[in-house]
Image (cartoon, helix red, strand yellow):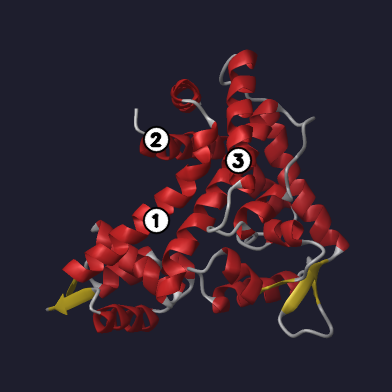
Amino acid sequence: MSIIALWPTALEALEALGTHYGPAMDQAAAELGLSEWNGWLLPALMFEPEPISATLLRTRSPYTSARWFNARLAKAARQGFLIPVAEAEGEYRLTELGRQAAERVMGAMYVKLAALQPLSSTDLERLASLLRRLVMSCLAAPEPPGKWYILHSRRIDPGDNASVVARIDQYGGDLAAYRDDAHLAAWQSHNIEGHAWEAFTYLWRGEATTLDEVSQKLERRGYSRDEYRHALEDLIGRGWAQGEAGKYQVTASGQKIRQAAEEITDRYFYAPWSCLSQEEMEDLWTLLIHLHDSL
């Protein structure tokens, strides 16, 4: 078993967990009149006492447009969930109603997680213990990468008294945050916009080959087709991509750049995993597979 296979296995298990509580969170938000809560409601709780803004949220999600965030923050303020910070344009804080909404949405998740028993209690505690050790090792690891994502993820830890499945979900989220820290450190030195880097990644993976495919598959990010056209032109200008007859592909130079970023990400991300022995990593892998399958 390769260590590189561990994180994709963990992600699959986390995604399986999400299918159990995601609809309950959406329902809790809908009951409060919140149809567009993803991307800002829980970060607003996570960032307290700092105000939130499109700028701060783009630090957390550099692939999403400021326009997308600004529209949702302004709408939430009109609904009474946020209040603008008087001395700073574009910054908001949760109102009491907003804080209650965030806690209710989180509460719906914890109720669902507490009801799950996908493995024996012994196996669940063992899995939680291994994941927690990884999280603590990431926090103690030397820089780079930085720890902005994982430190903010830790702010919403439900604590040791939470259900074991809730703790597993939290630790998995913490590790996903550290993966983001690692990847950010791997590509931001190239001084490229986040949406252009993501478009580059889609070309590199073969998930898109035309402007229409890029803009359609990344529509959720809030950028226009024209903005993605400029992003692809930037990639061509860097020598990372080439376009002909409306088709785009990564050049040999681009392949080298993008592969190097992936390898750097893996090196940063997996370095703290040395806290586990080979036997413990095998144990972790087995438990994650069993968790996924039983969910």
Pointer 1 or 2: first along the chain: 2
Looking at the rendered structure, the secondary structure element under dot 2 is helix
Q: Tell me the amino acid under the disc marked 2.
A: Ile
**253 above or below 170?**
below
Residue at image location 59% in from the left, 64% down from the top: 60
Q: Quadrant of the N terminus?
A: top left
Label 1, label 2: how far apart the Cα atoms are? 15 Å
Residue 229 position, x and y percent, is 31, 81
Pointer 3 or 1: first along the chain: 3
Numbered label attached to residue 264: 1
Task: Determine crowd level at label 3: few under 14, some 14-19, many 20+ residues with C-alpha closer than 10 A.
Answer: some
Numbered label attached to residue 137: 3
Choose between 122 and 2: the one closer to the eye: 2
**246 above or below 129?**
below
Residue 210 position, x and y percent, is 23, 71
Residue at image location 39% in from the left, 35% down from the top: 3
**158 above or below 151?**
above
Can residue 198 be spotted in the picture? yes
Choose between 220 and 184: the one closer to the eye: 184
Q: Splitting the image into 4 quarters, where does residue 159 fall?
A: top right
Q: Residue furthest left?
A: 245
Q: How many marks?
A: 3
According to the picture, the residue beneath numbered tag 2 turns out to be 3
Q: Splitting the image into 4 quarters, where does residue 49 fall?
A: bottom right
